[in-house]
Amino acid sequence: MIEREVLEDASALIRGSGSVVILGHQYPDGDAVGSVLGLGLMLRDLGKTVEVSWPEPFEVPGRLTFLPGLDMMVGPDKLEPEDLIVTVDCASRERLPDFNKILRGGFNVVNIDHHTDNTMFGTVNIVDKDAAATAEIVYLIHRDLGLELTEDAAVCLYTGILTDTGKFQFNNTSVETLKVASELAAAGVKPSWIYENVYQSDSLNYLLFTGDALSRCVLEEDTGLTYVFISQENLKRFGVRMSETEDLIDSLRALKTHRIAALFKELESGTIRVSMRSRNDIDIGSIARKLGGGGHKVAAGYTSSRNGFEDTLNELRREIIEAGWGTDNR
Ligand code: AMP
Ligand code: MN
Ligand code: MN
């Protein structure tokens, strides 16, 4: 639950500002993009000048390009906040690497998020750890903030909830989540149309890339870890962008005997970004935090400080065993 006082403070900040900059986290997912755009559209309808952004690489994942409101996007280098800053789906300032200067520039910051490890870095913090998605929070508070929901905004928020709940299948899906989804449907969202856009819009190249990636999937006995490594070379071979691969990890989770799923993604710089998911309440959020990242108990990630894939894998393996999640410890 979010306290009334907090919502009143946020509402006052919005009322008192002419322009709003809305920031999502680096490598944005459906929730970050959906929340940024949904909130942006509602604020624009209220008469505010709105700019939305996220850190480099500043691109919209292919399956989210159908969302309304993309004309509000302004690259991080061109952003010039004058008034209020709102961050969505960001647990900490570290998830906003290109914006540290403006976040410390004396502007008021409204921090809207659902991560358990949120550092409460805003002037006002609207953080609800029980919400399945930041988009769910944005919907639940929009009236308190003096905002009106349009069909376009509803499309964005529904997409955020759909993607963060794995199509309403993950255990963050609550009665409240389904209620919000139904209210968004009542506002004009067609669930099958969103599904088609998000989940039935892959290219043949992407399907072939997925087949190749899954053919290299490994399952480890001692850690219960299943993983795939995606190199720049793999992407190039199929003409696929890294931002298209967000959902690949869900295919690894189909494996009956896995306990932790990990996707190792080689960035252009050679650095490895690690996406993790777990089952049976295995706490990978604390492992990710220990390795310099963060996230939820069962969905977390970090950018490796190790050189290359092998070192990154070995480090993660050690951390899993040390944390007591190895199968030998059970
Ligand atoms: P992803 O695997 O990128 O979908 O991320 C899963 C969860 O972990 C999300 O809730 C992210 O907010 C969080 N996360 C991913 N990467 C990082 C990171 N480098 N630092 C902090 N949190 C992260
Ligand atoms: Mn997110
Ligand atoms: Mn989220």
Image (cartoon, rainbow, N blue to C red):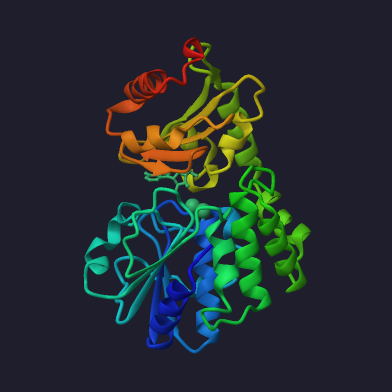
- State the residue in front, 137 or 163: 137
In the rendered view, would you say 45 is above or below 211?
below
Residue 116 % position (x, y): 44, 49
Residue 137: quadrant of the picture: bottom right
Residue 111: quadrant of the picture: bottom left
**Residue under the point 68% across and 75% down:** 151
**Residue under the point 59% across and 26% down:** 214
- State the residue in front, 152 or 327: 327
Q: Can residue 271 be seen in this snapshot?
A: no
Residue 231 % position (x, y): 43, 32
In the rendered view, would you say 119 is above or below 42?
above
Is 126 situated left or right of 176 in this image?
Answer: left
In the rendered view, would you say 273 is above or below 243?
above
Q: Can residue 268 be seen in this snapshot?
A: yes
- State the residue in front, 258 or 139: 139
Residue 15 % position (x, y): 43, 87
Total numbered labels placed on residues in the image:
0
Is 93 situated left or right of 112 in this image?
Answer: left
**Residue under the point 49% across and 30% down:** 262
Residue 239 % position (x, y): 52, 42
